[in-house]
Image: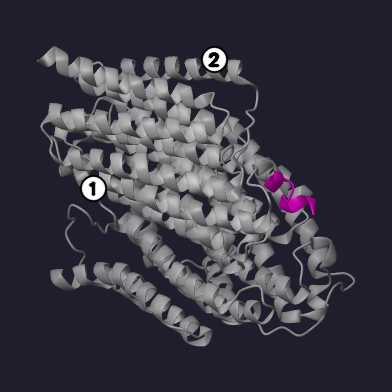
Amino acid sequence: MGDLTFDVAHMLAGGLVLLSFVMLYQDRLYALLNVYALHAVVLAASVAWQAFAQDAPHLYVTAAIALAFKAVVIPTSLHRIIRRLGIHREIETVGGVGPTMLAGMGLVALSLAVMLRITPEAEPLAREDLAFALSVVLLGLLMMVTRRNAVSQVVGFMSLENGLVLAAAGARGMPLVVEISVAFSILIAFIVIGIFLFRIRERFDTVDLHALDRFRGERR
Amino acid sequence: MNGLGFDAVAAVLLIPLASAALLVLLPGYRLTARLNVLASLLTLLAALSLLVVERPAAGPYLLVDDLNIVFIVLNTFVGFTTSAFSASYIGHELETGRLTPTYLRFYHAMYQVMMFGMNLALVANNIGLMWVAVELATLTTVLMVGIYRTHEALEAAWKYFILGSVGIALALFGTILVYMAARPVVGEGMDAMVWTVLLERAAGFDPALVNVAFVFLLLGYGTKVGLAPLHAWLPDAHAEGPTPISAVLSGLLLNVALYAVLRFKLLLAANPGGIATGPLMVTMGLASVLLAAVMLYRRRDIKRLFAYSSIEHMGIIVFAFGMGGPLANFAGLLHMVMHSLTKSAIFFAVGHVAQVKGTQRMSEIGGLTETHPWLGWSLVLGVVAIAGLPPMGIFMSEFLLVSSTFAREPVLTVILVAGLLLAFGALLMRLNGLAFGEPKGATAPVHASYVPMFAHLALVLAAGLFLPGPVVAWFQNVAALLG
C-alpha cells in the first residue's frame, strides 16, 4: 500500500511536469489551451491523491476547485475570448523549440538537484512532490519568457500557479487558508486578465505584446 | 484595556474595507473624494491610538509589535495625506476628461481596498495571510495603474502585473518552504505559519531548507521592493498611473514588501545554520543604487525620473538593513520614513506640475519658480531633500549610514557614496532645468493643495534639524530588534 501510494503520486506529479513540457512547444492557441486543461485535470488528480494519501479531506476541495475552475471554466472562457478577438493564428516562440526544450530540461535538473539535496529528512512523498512542483513553476516561468502573445503568457502564468498548488498540497497539514487563497488568487488574476484583454482589444487590433512594446514611455 | 487594543487593530483594517464598499455604492465625485479623505483620516487615528493603548496579545492571525507599528503609522499617515492630495488632483482629471465619473468611483473604492491590503500585510502574524494581503495590494495597484487606458498605461499595467505575479509566485513558494521547515519542529497545522511561533522555534529548523526559502522570498518580495535586476516594472507603473498612485506606490507599497523581507531576515538570523542574509541584501541594494543613479541621467519623463530615484533609495535602505547592527538599522529605518515622506511630497508637486503644463516631458517644463512660485519652490525643497542635502532628514540618515559603514566596510562605503553622488548630480541637473531658467509651457494658475506637501516637507525638515528623544528611543529599540 505504501509503495503504491508513493508510485501513484510520483506518476501524477511527473505527468504534470511532462505536460508542462508539452505546453512549451505548442504553437497554436487552441492546442495550448487544451493542454492547459489537461494540466489542470492531472493537477486535480494529483491533489486528490494527496488528500487520500494524507487523509486530509480538505484537499479534496482544492482538487475540486482545480477541476471545475481551471480545467473547465478558464479554458472555455479563454477559448471564447480568443474566438472573439480572432487571434487563433500561430503563435511565435522566441529562440525556437529545440533550445527552449533544452532550457526546460536544464531547469528540471536544477530543481531536482536543489530540492532533493535540501530535503533529505523530509518524507519521500513530500520531497518528490516539492521537486516536481518547483520544476513546474520554473517551466511556467520559462514559458512566460519565451512567449510574446498575451494569452499564452497568461497560460504560462496559470501553469506556474498549478505548480504552487502542487507544492502546497504536498506539504502535509498545510492550513487550508493557503490553498483557498491560491485558488482565489487565480480567480482574481483571471478577472484582471479578462479586463486587460478587453481593454487591449479596445485599443489595438492585436494582443501581441510586441505591439505594446512600441508604446514604451521614453520613446514618445 | 486589552479589548480596546484589539479594537484599534480591527479599526485599522475594517475602516478601509467598509469605506471601500460604501464608495462603490455612492455617486458623485465631490462626496466620494471627501469620504475617501475622511476614511483615511479615521484609519490614521486608529493607527495612532495603537501607540497609546495597550497592545493586543499576538493571535494566530494578527500581531502588533514595535517593528510593524512604525510601518503602520507611516502607512496610514501617507495614505491620509495622499487622499487629500488626490481629492484636488482628481477634480482636474475629471475636468480634462481623462477620467469618467464611473472610473472615479472605482478609483476611490480601489484606493481603500489597497489601504486595507497594505495594513493587513503589516499587521499579519501569519505568513500565509501576509502573502494574501500583499497579493491583494498588488492586484489593486495594477488596476489603478491601468486606469487611464492609454497605450502606455496598459503596457505599464501589464508589465507590472506579469512581473508582480511572478514575484508573488516565488514568494509563495518560499512561504511553503518555510512551512515545510517549520513542520517537523512546530507540528502540523496553523501554528507552523504563525510569526511569533516561528521566531521562537526557528533555531530548530532545517537550515538548508530555510536558506533556500529565503532566496525565494528575497527574490519574490524583492521584485515588489523594486530591487535591481527585478525593477523593470517600477518606472512604467509610476509614470503611467495617476500621480496619487505613484505617491502611494513609492511611499508605501515598496515599504510593505520590504517589511516582509525584514521579517524573514529575522527568522534566518534566529537560525544558527542560516546563511548570512546581509551580503545578499547589501549586494542587491548596492546594485540598485548604482543602476538607478546611472539611469537617472537619461530620463526625459519627470515621473520616471523620480521613479528611478525611488529605486535608488530603496537600494540604500536595503543596503542599510543588510549591513545590520544598531546604527545601520537605525539609519535604514530613518531613511525609510524620510524617503516615504519626501518622495510622496515630490509626487504631489509633480502631479500638479504635470497637470498645469499638460505634459510629463521635462524638456517642455521650465522656470517653475517664476511662473508658479509656490509649486516651484516646493518642488525645489523636495528635490533638495531627496538629493540628501542638509538640513533635511535624508541628509541625516545618509550621513549616519555612510559614517557607520565606513567604520566597518570602507570599500562598500566608497561604492555607496559614488552612487549617492551620481544620483545627486543627476537630480540637481534636472532640477535646474525644471525650476529655474526661462519659463516654458503653459502658465495658467494652478489650484493645488499645498497642505499635504508642506506637512511632509516640514516633517522632513524637522527630523533633519532635531529628532525628539522619544522618537530616537523608539527607533533605537526597533533597530536593536532587527539585529
Can I make out residue B298 in this image? Answer: yes
Q: Position of residue A214 (x, y in %)?
A: 74, 47
Amino acid residing under circle 2: Leu
Which residue is painted at 61% across and 67% down in the image? B243
For mark 1, give the secondary structure.
helix
Residue B19 relative to residue A144: left or right: left
Closer to us: B227 or A131: A131
* Quadrant where the C terminus of chain B is found in the figure: top left
Per the rendering, the mark at residue A177 is 1
User: Does the magenta-highlighted stretch encompass residue A215?
Assistant: yes
Taking depth in this image into account, of B402 and B217 the one nearest to the observer is B217
> Disc 2 marks which residue?
A102
Whole-percent x, y for residue B223 in the image: 51, 43
Question: Badge 2: few (under 14), some or many (20 or more) residues near its Cα, within 10 Å?
Answer: few
Mark 1 belongs to which subunit?
Answer: A
Q: Residue at horizontal 59%, vertical 37%?
A: B229
Whether residue A128 appears in magenta in the rendering, the answer is no
Tag count in the figure? 2
Q: Nearer the viewer, mark 1 or mark 2?
A: 2
Point out the stretch of residues depicted in magenta: A211-220
Quarter occupied by the N terminus of chain B: bottom left
Quadrant housing residue A124: top left
Q: Nearer the viewer, residue A134 or A71?
A: A71
Placement of A168 over or under A126, stated as above or below: below
Residue A113 marker = none
Q: Residue at x 28, y 27 (%)?
A: B272
Residue A23 located left or right of residue B182: right
Q: Secondary structure at mark 2?
A: helix
Identify the chain of the residue marked 2, using the numbered disc in the image. Answer: A
Disc 1 marks a residue whose amino acid type is: Val
Magenta part, dominant SS:
helix
* Quadrant of res B212: top left
